[in-house]
């Protein structure tokens, strides 16, 4: 009985703690757009980028300048683009906006 309760509790903990809202997609970086401080819309200082294959409904992955991982994401994207390597992007498919933009949650790996 005790072991069963531990297993059930642990299973529920894992279920509720997992990132069930996120999806991952892999591809090669084909385009990176950076926007300066004088840019006329909400992408001032931000970044939009594309992969060679994009998920359905997504036109660009995005990273805002205020994102704590902006520099790390930019470095990873440049390295992957230069090496022509695949990267794995994690994003929330429920957060795709009307323009097909979706925020990058993580870049989890770089591979050949």
Image (cartoon, grey):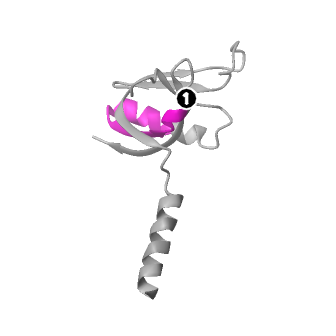
Q: Residue at x 38, y 26 (%)?
A: 54
Percent position (x, y) of residue 109?
39, 46
Location of the N terminus (image quadrant): bottom left
Percent position (x, y) of residue 42?
69, 20
**Which is nearer the eye, 65 or 91?**
91
Percent position (x, y) of residue 102?
53, 29
Q: Residue at x 64, y 43 (%)?
A: 68
State which quadrant residue 24 falls in: top left
Query: Image height check: is 66 above or below 39?
Result: below
**Which is nearer the eye, 92 or 54?**
92
Location of the C terminus (image quadrant): top left
Relative to 22, is 52 on the left or the right?
A: left
Tell me if residue 26 can be seen: yes
Q: How many marks?
A: 1
**Which is nearer the eye, 55 or 106?**
55
Asked if the magenta segment contains residue 5, the reply would be no
């Amino acid at each position: 009985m005790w072991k069963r309760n531990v297993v059930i509790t642990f299973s529920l903990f894992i279920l509720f703690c997992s990132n069930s809202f996120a999806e991952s997609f892999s591809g090669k970086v084909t385009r990176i757009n950076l926007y300066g401080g004088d840019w006329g819309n909400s992408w001032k200082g931000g970044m939009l980028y594309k992969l060679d294959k994009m998920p359905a409904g997504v036109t660009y992955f995005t990273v805002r300048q205020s994102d704590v991982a902006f520099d790390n994401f930019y470095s990873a994207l440049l390295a992957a683009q230069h090496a022509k390597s695949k990267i794995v992007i994690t994003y929330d498919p429920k957060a795709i906006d009307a323009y097909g933009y979706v925020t990058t949650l993580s870049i989890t790996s770089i591979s050949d």
